[in-house]
Amino acid sequence: MWNRVQETVKFLKDKGFVNSEYGIVLGTGLGNLTQIIDIEQSIPYTEIPNFPTSTVQGHSGNLIYGTLSGKKVVALQGRFHYYEGWSMQELTFPIRVFKFLGIENLIVSNASGGVNPKFKVGDVMVITDHINMMNEHPLRGANDERFGVRFVDMHEPYNLQMISQFKAIAKEHKINLQEGVYLALQGPTFETPAEYIMVKAMGADTVGMSTVPEVIVAKHMNMNCLGISIITDLGLEGQAESVSHEAVQLAAKTAEKDVMLMVKEFVSEI
Ligand code: HPA
């Protein structure tokens, strides 16, 4: 893993991926953040040594380097999901690469199903904590100390200062921002009514199929993480509703403008 990360980092540095302050994972419906990034480089994953290649519809696969709000950023346009068949090591590989490109701050976005009755479809939630219910841990196996310690401290998975800054931005722009706990299941099935009840009983506000592996690997390397989730459907007890990939994409679209604005402001401030 170490050698593969260094090889990819060298390839990208040679292409000019230098001095970046933020790594951004553009989740479902948020690919358009690229519209406000002044793009200097966009390299298809297929052309990057050791990179996995994304297959799910709605996810194009490019690694982007450019300027957002005056800061250099690297963005994953199209993320890797466990349900696609990637191993945990493969799907979190780009996060390792971010770190060794010199990036200390990670911004991740996703779509999720809300189980908190106060939530509405189209709400944006800043993730304050997560529950890892995926069936495989991304740090399982021999630990390479060059990346981080064996037993990773997770007392602050999402950076508290980043969270309060993001909340302040929402307030300033009169955007209704929810906050809460994201629980990750492996997917690709959406939850059954009983599973939504389980998710809520476990203490989560939303459920999704991503983000947690990336954040765990980022924390392994001591990065600061900001997580943003768009509530694209609701799994409320006794109110089972049908949900589809298309409905998720559509609902994410409605919140996209607000998320883009907040991320743009967020990056400009630090
Ligand atoms: N469950 C899991 N993943 C999701 C959901 C959901 O309800 N909505 C969007 N992504």
Image (cartoon, rainbow, N blue to C red):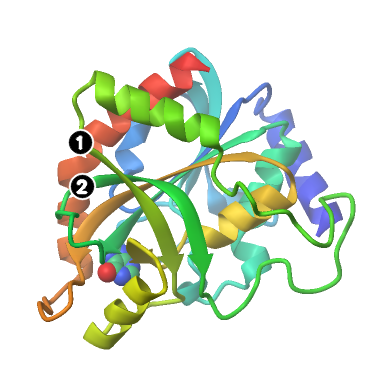
Q: Residue at x 15, y 55 (%)?
A: 121
Amino acid carrying mark 2 in the image: Asp
Q: Residue at x 72, y 31 (%)?
A: 102
Q: Position of residue 25 (x, y in %)?
A: 48, 45
The residue that label 1 is drawn on is 176
Q: Position of residue 59 (x, y in %)?
A: 37, 55
Residue 14 lies, with reference to residue 214, above or below; the image says above
Residue 226 lies, with reference to residue 51, above or below; the image says above
Q: Is residue 157 left or right of residue 81?
A: right
Query: Where is residue 214, by image quadrant?
Result: bottom right
Viewer-proximal residue among 12 and 174: 174
* SS under mark 2: loop
Q: Is residue 55 left or right of residue 32?
A: right
Asked if residue 42 can be seen in this view, the reply is: no
Label 1: how many Cα within 10 Å (few below 14, some 14–19, many 20+) = few
Label 2: how many Cα within 10 Å (few below 14, some 14–19, many 20+) = many
Amino acid carrying mark 1 in the image: Asn
Q: Quadrant of ligand 1?
A: bottom left
Sequence-wise first label, 1 or 2: 2
Q: Residue furthest right?
A: 145
Q: Residue at x 42, y 74 (%)?
A: 202
Q: Which mark is residue 105?
A: none
Query: Where is residue 140, by image quadrant?
Result: bottom right
- Judge: label 1 CB < 8 Å from ligand 1: no
The residue that label 2 is drawn on is 123
Viewer-proximal residue among 105 and 178: 178
